[in-house]
Amino acid sequence: MQTVFDLTELPNFLGKLMPKLKKQSKIRWHIVVFLAPAIFIYTAVMIYPLFNTLRLALFTKVDQTRLYVGLENFQTLFGDPIWSDQFWNALGNNLSFFMVHMLVQNPIGIALAAILSHPTLRFSSFYRTAIFIPTMLSFVIVGFAWKLILSPIWGIAPGLLDFVGLKSLYAPWLGKEAYALTTLSLISVWQFVGIPMMLIYAALLSIPDEILEAAEVDGITGFSAFWKIKLPLILPSIGIISILTFVANFNAFDLIYAAQGALAGPNFSTDILGTFMYRTFFGFQLQLGDPHMGSAIASAMFAIILIGVCLYLFGVQSRMRRYQF
Amino acid sequence: MITNYKNRLNTLAAHSGLILYTCIVLFPVFVVVINSFKTRKAIFRDPLALPNADSFSLIGYETVLKQGDFFLYFQNSMIVTIVSLFFILIFGAMAAFALAEYRFKGNFLTGLYLALGIMIPIRLGTVAILELMVQTGLVNTLWALILVYTAQGLPLAVFILSEFMKQVSQDLKDAGRVDGLSEYRIFYRLVLPLMRPAMATVAVFNMIPIWNDLWFPLILAPAEEVKTLTLGSQVFIGQFVTDWNAVLSALSLAILPALGLYVIFSRQLIRGITSGAVK
């Protein structure tokens, strides 16, 4: 009978175990080494703070100690008129900011790309380069330069309008509640029109010539070729541009801050979610910063962006017809 | 004949449209730059005139260079941008190589995890990022900015680079393995040199937002000695609002580096966008 302590069996047993052990312990360390720095920085500086911000939204500060209050911050944000009025104002402004981009920036971008992609057009690389210049400039430059140009003190804008006989249309747009937001949206459009232009341009170039030639044989050229052949083919790119615009607009901040300051004047008429969150979280003038309310606003923005992206991914992207060339 | 005429008319319309738009684009930059070289009187008397012998003045530039620490700001911006780009490229390329080259458990999930960051803006985590930087003592250092921009740039870098890594010939890598090269050497010696064009594209994509960012310098590093050029000019211009010479000169000085970078990299940028990064 074999005892449990039969040592002669040990090598045999180990021999049987070894391949298993070897296989299990064969972590391919180079994969870990390759992935570790990127995963570590990304997790520590981006993902962890994102979720930590969502968590902080559930706390508040009382006498220097952190107190768990559940959804109370959100109740304040949506229930207390002082907060909720500001929030809905910022959200509404943000929506119109986004709408101006969708209705002005993207159509102009598409039109410019359509003209530029014409194969026989001369100087197209010059135009492309020039139109992309504002995108390279910082919001600070763009905000201040336009502020100066539109300023009634300097008189460039009224002077130019006078030149074309429309002086009566001039108003200090950035200072009027009714116009300030639209003016700033258009300045942002001016700055970023290069991006949709480039992306659509790339999409138009990737349409194979055979398709356009086949259409030409059937007598479809010029404008109708654009509407009937090219536009349907670049719809996926337009979709991507729309969602990029959406995400960028709903965390915009810099231009408004550079041109109008943290108070997003006049009378909060240009306040968007980014400036609202900055003011709440960081404080300004008389109001003290409140990181927990700031987190609550950030969480609301997170939800809005997430909903938008999901709507796009599952509602638009998946239904879009894609053509394989 | 008729189509010929019509064609020419179309070309004319196309050019006039493009020229008009180009003027709209360049006009503000042009106005700011020419007026920065004029005397205060001339700025207001005739804003659209080019500076001439009579109206030429560098007083604005003198004020800016005397008052603001623009060289320091410029240096800070340079350090932050270059170091962040370096980390984005090297860590992004390493992760992209691991995801594209090896089959292992969790490969797809890791890729998906990294891709999350493409759509979700890092700004939403600002409150916790500030807390983290305060705890680690990195607040008001350039490292805070470098870490944030690296984290922000990595997702897209991994995504774009792994697409390119998949196209590297398998035979080349296998030949390297037969010759006894370690996986690290295969990455560093064989694959990385082939990635140069793709890495240039990623660098150019990331460079502009990092250089121009106002949000994180404002929150994480507002101290005088770590101000970036964007934040520095914002604060400077805010203080000198009524000194038009100084404001216009500061704006021109801030435009210059961006324009310089653009002139150097515009070909790479346009090639990068049009070569199907977002196809």
Image (tube, coloured by chain):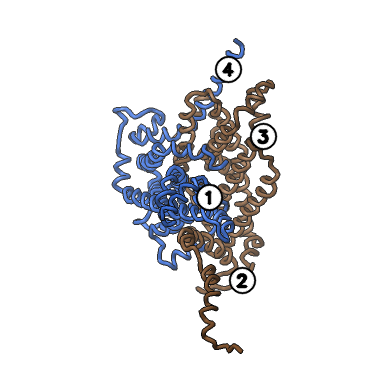
Chain colours: A brown, B blue
Name the residue located 69 percent from the left edge and 40 percent from the top edge.
A321
Q: Secondary structure at mark 1?
A: helix
Sequence order check: which comes first, mark 2 or mark 3?
2
Could you say where residue A98 lies in the image, as x and y percent from the top left?
60, 44
Respond whether the residues carrying marks 1 and 3 are from the same subunit. Answer: no
Above or below, B135 against A141 in this view is below
Respond whether the residues carrying marks 1 and 2 are from the same subunit. Answer: no
Identified by mark 1, the residue type is Phe
Tell me the distance, in whole angstroms, between the alpha carbons under discs 2 and 4: 70 Å
Q: What residue is pinned by disc 3?
A: A232
Tell me the distance, in whole angstroms, between the alpha carbons under discs 1 and 3: 27 Å
Tell me the distance, in whole angstroms, between the alpha carbons under discs 2 and 3: 51 Å
Q: What residue is pinned by disc 4?
A: B7
Left or right side of A25 for A70: right
Q: Chain of mark 4?
A: B
Q: Kindly tell me whether residue B221 is visible in this rendering.
A: yes
Q: Secondary structure at mark 4?
A: helix
Q: Secondary structure at mark 3?
A: helix
Residue closest to the eye, B87 or B40: B87
Q: Which mark is residue B159?
A: 1
Identified by mark 4, the residue type is Asn
Q: Which mark is residue A69?
A: 2
Q: What is the crowding at mark 2: few (fewer than 14 residues within 10 Å), some, or many (at least 20)?
A: few
